[in-house]
Amino acid sequence: MGRTKLTLALLALGVSLALFVLVRGERHVALSYVVPCEVALPAGLALTAPLPPDVTVTFSGPWRRLRSLSPADVGPIRIDFSRVRAGSASWSVRPESLHLPRDVHVDSVFPAQGTADLRPAAPAPSPPQPRRGAARRLRGPESER
């Protein structure tokens, strides 16, 4: 019986040492992704110049968390102007707005902020109305008489 306890104690010590080495030796890495942006505008307003279609975000964290992360998992980043009136408005990307796994942190976002001008949108052109009057053929084969 003493020998079995000694074997189990050595096995437990070996497992705990292996776990300690694995956890302490985990690689901490940094990755950069290009994450798409989407813009929400209020009805009747339009941007005078386009905003960036995407931003570059640098993440850091354990390799096991970052290896399966993709830009689609993180974003899209929403730039919300829905409560803004016509004129100049500023926007920013807050790291808290990104959907990140546990233990993953945002190191940088570029561009992280900017300004935009919103102006009343030009009305959409109305479809052409048919002219009233006698119908006539504009082009086509001559009709037989």
Image (spheres, helix red, strand yellow):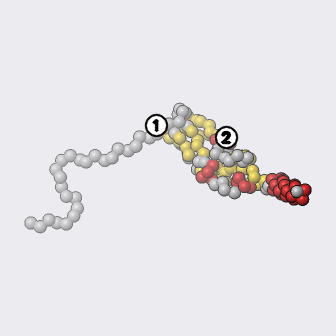
Q: Is residue 25 visible?
A: no
Going 81% across and 55% down the picture, which residue do you hit?
19
Label 2: which residue? 96
**Percent position (x, y) of residue 137?**
19, 58
Q: Residue at x 55, y 43 (%)?
A: 39
Q: Secondary structure at mark 2?
A: helix
Query: Could you tell me which secondary element the residue under label 1 belongs to?
Result: loop
Snapshot quadrant of residue 136: bottom left
Between 73 and 86, which is closer to the camera in this rendering? 73
Query: Vertical placement of 53 versus 3: above or below?
Result: above
Q: Mark 2 is on which residue type? A: Glu
Q: Position of residue 10 (x, y in %)?
A: 88, 57
Disc 1 residue type? Answer: Gly
Judging by the rendered image, the residue that carries numbered circle 1 is 44
Residue in view at x 70 percent, y 54 percent: 66
* Front residue of 107 and 7: 7
